[in-house]
Amino acid sequence: MGGVLKSLDQTEALSHIERLESAFFQISSLFGVHKDLNTILEHVVRESLNCLRANRSTLFLYDPTSDVLNVQFTHALAPRYQRVGLVEEKKVVKKALRQGKPLLLAGPESFSDFFKYEERENKITSLMSIPLFACGKAMGVLSALLINGRYDFDEKSLRFFSSFSNLASAAMELAHFVEEAQAGKDFRITYEQYLDNILSQLQTLSDREQQRIQTHIAVIQAEQKVENREFLEGKANESGPWTRGSILLQEDPGIERRKEERIEVMVQVEFEEEYWCFTGSLSRGGAFVLTQNPMDLEDEFSLKIHVPDGREPIEVGCKVIWTNKYGQQSKDLRRGMGVKFLKLQPQDQIRIDEFTKAFKPQVFS
């Protein structure tokens, strides 16, 4: 405690240590019984005042909408200390919030950067301000000060005061998580009620109306498949994309499959220096990688397939089993290489199958 304990005799110091133990026990107990945020913060302010033997302790909260620091709670040792140096204290508090780090002022020379340390009946002689963080942002400041003090706060006092600020930050963080959890719960309840309402309305429809809805849904799905196929065909026919780094992944010409199993889709892949490139027909056995820089026969490499299902890309080892590295290019024989997937994991096979099922099969001549 530094200057605080130094100013006490042995009996007073032992009594003060007991007070510290009681303070932390009371605050931590509030977490256990799930008290609201304001109750915990007010206890932090009051107990920090008593344990530091300060003249005033204040918790400021930052309002981002108005860019203002507001006094949330304040406790003073006596009514006459309630507003002494409040304007000067706010200057220090704002700097601590802006810099995101604690500030310790002790002695007249420490205040020169903030205000003129002039003679007056009651004045701040030492001050500590520590930012409070929640969700990675400085959301407030806990401040304590001495008025006409016979000692100053020191580094030990600042470390001790940080224990109270950490409890306040933890309370703010916990309150945020509880609020987010409640918002999620409310959303789920509203969503379930919305679904129940839709189901209730559907049950009241006649068979004819239900059939019309199902037919309409089928038409929308068919139109979406056509749009996907037209998009893929447009990408395949564009002459511009096939520059360095562009990749088309399509059915491996060396793999015998039934024509109805060949599914034309467009995804993104990357391998070695070639990044975020378009792909074409995708199957679980292998592919034809359309690239201006094909590898040599028998080369093995790792290919990442970015299946757009919201999960991590599929990474699979590949082996070049056919290459058109030096041959002539044509519409039916583009620059690229036929690859075979090596040890494609079962769960990745399922992901590819589920993704390609959304597309209408296309027959290749």
Image (tube, rainbow, N blue to C red):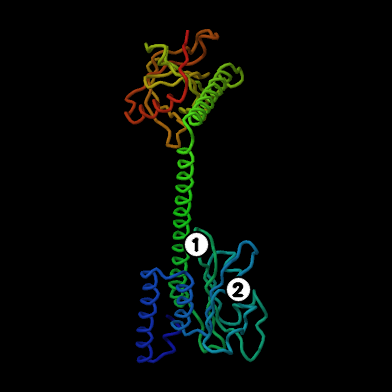
Residue 87 drawn at (x, y percent): 65, 78
Q: Is residue 149 left or right of residue 321?
A: right
In three-dimensional space, the C-alpha distance between marks 2 and 1, rounded to whole angstroms, equals: 20 Å
**In the rendered view, would you say 175 is above or below 335?**
below
Percent position (x, y) of residue 121?
A: 63, 91
Residue 138 picture quarter: bottom right
Residue at 52% x, 89% y is 150
Q: Residues within 10 Å of mark 2 (few under 14, many from 20)?
A: many
- Mark 1 residue type: Ala
Residue at image point 35% right, 26% down: 349
Q: Are marks 2 and 1 in contact (CB under 8 Å)?
A: no
Q: Viewer-proximal residue, 156 or 132?
A: 132
| Residue 150 against residue 211 in the figure, above or below | below
Query: Is 129 located above or below residue 288 in the figure?
Result: below
Residue sitting nearer the eye, 67 or 110 = 67
Q: Amino acid at mark 2?
A: Val
In this view, the residue in front, 48 or 38, is 38
Residue at screen point 60% across, 18% down: 238
Secondary element type, mark 2: helix
Q: Toward which corner of the image does residue 347 lie, by quadrant?
A: top left
- Residue labelled with disc 1: 134
Give the total number of marks visible in the rendering: 2
Depth check, mark 2 against mark 1: the one in front is: 1
Which residue is the site of mark 2?
92
- The quarter of the image holding the N terminus is bottom left
Q: Which mark is residue 155?
A: none
**First in sequence: mark 2 vs mark 1:** 2
Question: Quick one: SS at disc 1?
Answer: strand
State which quadrant residue 33 falls in.
bottom left
Question: Quick one: label 1, few (<14), some, or many (20+) residues within 10 Å?
Answer: some
Residue 309 vs residue 104, the one in the foreground: 309
x and y percentages locating residue 207 in the rendered image: 46, 30
